[in-house]
Image (cartoon, rainbow, N blue to C red):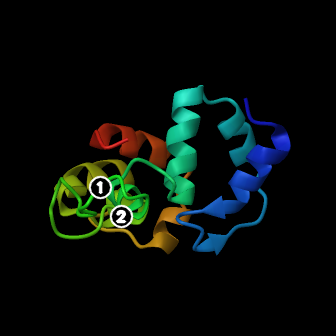
């Protein structure tokens, strides 16, 4: 189990380390309350260290980093959550938009991002 300081560090990171957010106690409490599987998925989404093809290619586990859902772009957290055309209908239903920028994604509670990722079948 992660310590509170480790979760606080993770809370400060968001989406492939592209931006540092201020500490948010609500997000920390949410993350601490997750089961181990969901916490692993969430941390992977937020840091980019996950089982999506782009990271697997970086680790030399996969030869192809393309998204298997759309075959149009590298499969990253940002692509899956905000841009993949294959998940556009679900994204619109859950998040209210067909495409989302990383800045847009930062405005969603982590529970929404986790739910969307799990519903995609890729996490």
Which image quarter holds the C terminus?
Answer: top left
Q: Is residue 25 visible?
A: no
Which image quarter holds the N terminus?
Answer: top right
Asked if marks 2 and 1 touch (Cβ < 8 Å), the reply is: no
Within-10-Å neighbours for mark 1: few <14, some 14–19, many 20+: some
**For mark 1, what is the residue?**
62
Q: Give the residue drawn at x 17%, y 69%.
A: 72
Indicate whether 114 appears above or below 59. Answer: above
Q: Position of residue 11 (x, y in %)?
A: 70, 53
- The quadrant holding residue 106 is bottom right
Comparing 98 with 116, the one in front is 116
**For mark 2, what is the residue?**
82
Report the residue that reaches farthest toward the front: 60
- The quadrant holding residue 77 is bottom left
Comparing 4 with 30, the one in front is 4
Question: In 3D space, how far apart are the residues under numbered discs 2 and 1 (Cα atoms)?
Answer: 23 Å
- The quadrant holding residue 54 is bottom left
Which secondary structure, mark 2?
Answer: helix
Q: Give the residue drawn at x 50%, y 59%.
A: 48
For residue 72, the mark is none
Q: Is residue 19 visible?
A: yes
Comparing 120 with 89, the one in front is 120
Q: Is residue 66 left or right of residue 119?
A: left
Instruction: Select label 2 or label 1 by which is in front.
Output: 1
């Amino acid at each position: 189990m992660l310590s509170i300081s480790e979760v606080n560090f993770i809370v400060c990171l968001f989406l492939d380390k592209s931006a540092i957010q201020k500490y948010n106690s609500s997000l920390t409490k949410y993350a601490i309350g997750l089961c181990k599987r969901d916490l692993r998925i969430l941390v992977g989404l937020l840091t980019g260290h996950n089982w999506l093809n782009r990271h697997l290619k970086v680790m030399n586990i996969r030869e192809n980093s393309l998204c298997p859902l759309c075959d149009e772009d590298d499969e990253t957290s940002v692509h899956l959550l905000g841009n993949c055309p294959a998940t556009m209908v679900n994204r619109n239903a859950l998040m209210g938009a067909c495409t989302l920028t990383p800045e847009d994604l930062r405005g969603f509670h982590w529970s929404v991002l986790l739910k969307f990722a799990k519903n995609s079948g890729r996490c």
